[in-house]
Amino acid sequence: MSSATRELREQLLTNNSELQRLAQEHSQYERQVQQLTKDPYLSVEDINRLAALKKMKLRVKDEMEQLIARHASGHSAQ
């Protein structure tokens, strides 16, 4: 990741409520994944929940990256 992208990400995390919401949601999923993976023996339900959480976490990360890319392309066009 370039330093310009990193700076834009930090700026958006400070000023963009949508990215803040997505980052918070991503962190929440990460905490749930960490909590589930603490147990060495997972039930079938836990394994399914873990898979679902990882998919939701990835979806949110993709949304965050798309939002940053939209802003990056808007900034480079100016």
Image: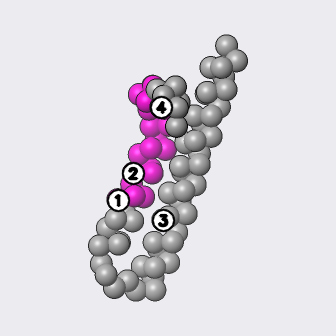
Residue 31: which numbered mark, if any? 1
Between label 4 and label 3, give the one nearer the viewer.
4
Which secondary structure type mostly characterizes the magenta part of the structure?
helix
Mark 3 or mark 1, earlier in chain = 1
**Figure check: 60 above or below 11:** below
User: Is residue 67 one of those drawn in magenta?
Assistant: no
Q: Is residue 41 left or right of residue 69?
A: left
Check disc 4: other Cα within 10 Å, few if <14, some if 14-19, many if 20+. few
Mark 3 or mark 2, earlier in chain = 2
Residue range highlighted in magenta: 8-31
Q: Nearer the viewer, residue 29 or 41?
A: 41
The residue wearing badge 4 is: 6
Q: In the rendering, at what x and y percent does residue 68 appear?
A: 57, 34
The residue wearing badge 2 is: 27
Residue 53: which numbered mark, if any? 3
Looking at the rendering, which quadrant does residue 13 occupy? Answer: top left
Q: Marks 1 and 4, how far apart in space? A: 23 Å
Mark 2 or mark 4, earlier in chain = 4
Q: Marks 3 and 1, how far apart in space? A: 10 Å
Q: Is residue 69 left or right of residue 46?
A: right
Mark 4 or mark 3, earlier in chain = 4
Check disc 3: other Cα within 10 Å, few if <14, some if 14-19, many if 20+. many
Q: Nearer the viewer, residue 7 or 54?
A: 7
Residue occupying the point 62% across, 34% down: 69
**Figure check: 10 above or below 27:** above
Q: In the rendering, at what x and y percent does residue 36 appear?
A: 35, 72
Residue occupying the point 52% across, 25% down: 4
Q: Marks 1 and 2, how far apart in space? A: 6 Å
